[in-house]
Image (tube, rainbow, N blue to C red):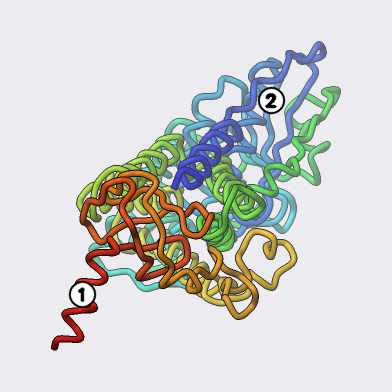
Amino acid sequence: MKKLLLTLCLSAVLAQSLCGQTPPPPADPAAEDVVYLIPIRGMIEPALLYVIRRGLDEARVSNARAVIFVMDTPGGTLDAASEIVRTIQALKVPTYTFVEKNAFSAGAIIALATDHIYMSPGSVIGDAMPIMMSPIGGVQEMSDDLKEKSVSAVAALIRSAAQEAGHRVDVAEKMVRRELELSIDGDVISPAGQLLTLTNVEAERSVGPDSQSLLSAGTAQNVDDLLTRIGLEGARKKELVVTATERVARFIAAFAPLFLMGGLLGIYIEIKTPGFGLPGIVGIICLSIFFWGHHIAGLAGMEDLILFTMGAILLLVEILFIPGFGAVGLVGILLMLVALVNSMIRRFPGGPLLPGWPQLQGPLVNLSLALLGAAAVAAIVAPLLPSIPAFNRLVLAKAARREDGYAASHDTQALVGLEGTALTALHPAGSARFGGRKVDVITRGEFIDAGANLKIVEAHGSRIIVEALSQTKGASDAEKRA
């Protein structure tokens, strides 16, 4: 069990060191001429939040002239979009969105949080109504109450983003609520019953008495054209590159059950084998990677790692110091499971503090798959460990049987019946001499003085049982008379 404590402690230390924050970059000497390009392509995931925060920190520290989000996305998770919106709103640098092709759902919400929106020819933006994805893929139906709760939260988020950035609030809300009608000065832009999705031509249409554009500030052929339109054609472009670490974090979040299974299986095998070796190291690495990846992905915080470590300590206290198995061990297991599940939960913006069943389904499925997978692999691997070269030196391959030449002590049956003299008082153990051979002996409980005559009556390996010779003769005479 000391090995298990060492394994879990090393896992916690390694994960904590991996979860450290990246320090801000040094100031750029040519900051006044820099425009930061941050790509938002593909699905918007929690891991993207870390990337965007890093890019915005670099832009802020370097006093960049502008930040341009180059966007082509079908959408993504609303919790990630919510955090990205808040991060953009806290930035003092002018922000732009350039829609290359599509800006749907979470992409439209992020675009509305930027100061200006430009679109390329043929691009579209809109349709931000929230949907719920099933843990096994596909769209999952929501109850009316849950749907209204989610739609209300997203509508508030997109209105807040539009208000802060100076865009039309009615246009933003129409992207979420299909039941509304969008009309300006009697001109119906989008009728009730359909969500608002705009092409680049429709988005830059001038409406109202002030001839304000509906959403887009204009159509640009590419980023260079956009820079010319905003008066920054001479600025140096610096595109944020997604690092290998950030790509790995997305992979870890996507394959969480595999890393969980590897961690649990490694610790199980380590407990079953002597010493500390490869299985424990693999278990530590898998659990550390699991927490590190979810931390980078914006899901797991240090509180999850601390909760997991506390649970492991309580479990060890129960196993090592408390007889039986009771409340302390159960609480420890519960804390560990809560930490693992909580590190995988994706929360809806504006949602309750405690997650509901729809949010718990995915993490519970991942944890269940990990537990079942680890149990299945352990059941298969455990009998094979003695034959695996990596472990056959650590595991006893077969029983040490007398037939194979193994014995804990010499065969002493030949000593039965020998007579001798007690060299020491037997109280009840001592030593005696039998035909010139000194032997450690023991009585059946009676005390025999030194010098008394003895006889060996039983021999079981190194356990030689004797009786006083007078007692032995008395018993023999009684048997004859009977």
In screen coordinates, is 334 left or right of 371? left
Distance of label 1 from label 2 (alpha carbons)? 110 Å
Residue identified by numbered label 2: 66
**Which corner quadrant of the image does residue 179 belong to?**
bottom left
* Percent of width and height locating residue 111: 57, 43
* Residue 476 vertical position relative to residue 331 in the rendered view, above or below: below
Type of residue at label 1? Ala
> Farthest residue in the top direction?
29
Residue at the location (69% across, 25% down)? 66
Residue at the location (20% across, 75% down)? 475
Quadrant (top left/top right/bottom left/bottom right) for the C terminus: bottom left
Front residue of this view, candidates 408 and 66: 408
> Farthest residue in the left direction?
482
For disc 1, the neighbor class at 10 Å (few under 14, some 14 to 19, many from 20) is: few
In this rendering, does residue 348 appear at all? no
For disc 2, the neighbor class at 10 Å (few under 14, some 14 to 19, many from 20) is: many
In this rendering, does residue 141 appear at all? yes
* Percent of width and height locating residue 406: 61, 70
Please give the label number shown on residue 174.
none
* Percent of width and height locating residue 296: 58, 41
> Farthest residue in the bottom direction?
482
* Residue 47 vertical position relative to residue 306 in the rendered view, above or below: below
Front residue of this view, candidates 223 and 153: 153
* Percent of width and height locating residue 419: 40, 64
Front residue of this view, candidates 385 and 330: 385
As helix, strand or loop, the secondary structure at mark 1 comes to helix
**Which corner quadrant of the image does residue 180 belong to?**
bottom left
In screen coordinates, is 399 left or right of 168? right
Residue identified by numbered label 1: 475
In screen coordinates, is 362 left or right of 28? left
Type of residue at label 2? Ala
Residue at the location (55% across, 60% down)? 269
